Image (cartoon, rainbow, N blue to C red):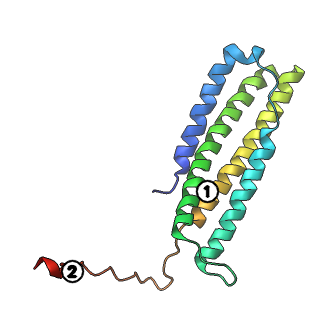
Amino acid sequence: MTPTRTRVLLVTAVVCALVAWLLLRPLYSTLPPLPWTGVPALLIAAAAEAWTGRDLRARILGRSGAKPALPIYVARMAVLAKATAHAAAVIAGLAAGFALYAAGSLPASIPKRDVITAGVTFAASLLLMLAALYLEHCCRVPRDPRGERDAPPPPPRPADHFH
């Protein structure tokens, strides 16, 4: 698995913003006001991922008092971080598209509230994306500080019972 590229996240967000903007053109007047309830969920997820990254980094580095992390746990956290970063990019794009479209109707009270809610949702999704990228970074095994690499494993020996 390769590290998440910020360029891919940016393209995802821009495409989702464009799609949201295009979909809102015919549908905005029929939609209820944008709910703010997603913001706390995004912030709680961001805090959880950042905390998990901090804890995991200590475990990988073998700091005193931290029990070692199992490789499967680290792999699962890396996959979670990658998926969360992409989901946060989608949410950020949708919120940006919503804010851009509603900003065209700012004198009205509902679009003004929608722009504020979409802007706060966008900011919360950016925090989640940063926390996910941090967690992904914390899953990396550090390089040997002396610059030495571990010796490659010896080649397999032929089985004695085949000769």
The quarter in which the N terminus is drawn is bottom left
Q: Residue furthest right?
A: 109
The answer to whether 46 is drawn above or below residue 71 in the figure is above
Q: Secondary structure at mark 2?
A: loop
Which residue is depicted at the point 83% across and 34% down?
116
Q: Secondary structure at mark 1?
A: helix
Q: Residue furthest left?
A: 163
For residue 148, what is the image quadrant? bottom left
Kind of residue sitting beneath label 2 = Arg
Q: Which residue is mark 1?
A: 133
Which residue is depicted at the point 68% across and 30% down?
97
Residue 132: x %, y % from top left: 64, 55
Task: Decide if residue 59 is on the left or right side of residue 42.
Answer: left
Instruction: Choose between 60 and 20: the one closer to the eye.
Output: 60
The quarter in which the C terminus is drawn is bottom left
Instruction: Choose between 112 and 121: the one closer to the eye.
Output: 121
Task: Decide if residue 118 is on the left or right side of residue 55.
Answer: right
Kind of residue sitting beneath label 1 = Leu
Residue 103: x %, y % from top left: 77, 25
Task: Decide if residue 32 is on the left or right side of residue 148.
Answer: right
Instruction: Choose between 109 and 71: the one closer to the eye.
Output: 71
Give the class, few, some or many, for how many residues have Cα within 10 Å of label 1's Cα (few <14, many ≥20): many
**Residue 157 badge:** 2
The answer to whether 122 is drawn above or below residue 46 in the figure is above
For residue 122, what is the image quadrant? top right
Residue 20: x %, y % from top left: 65, 26
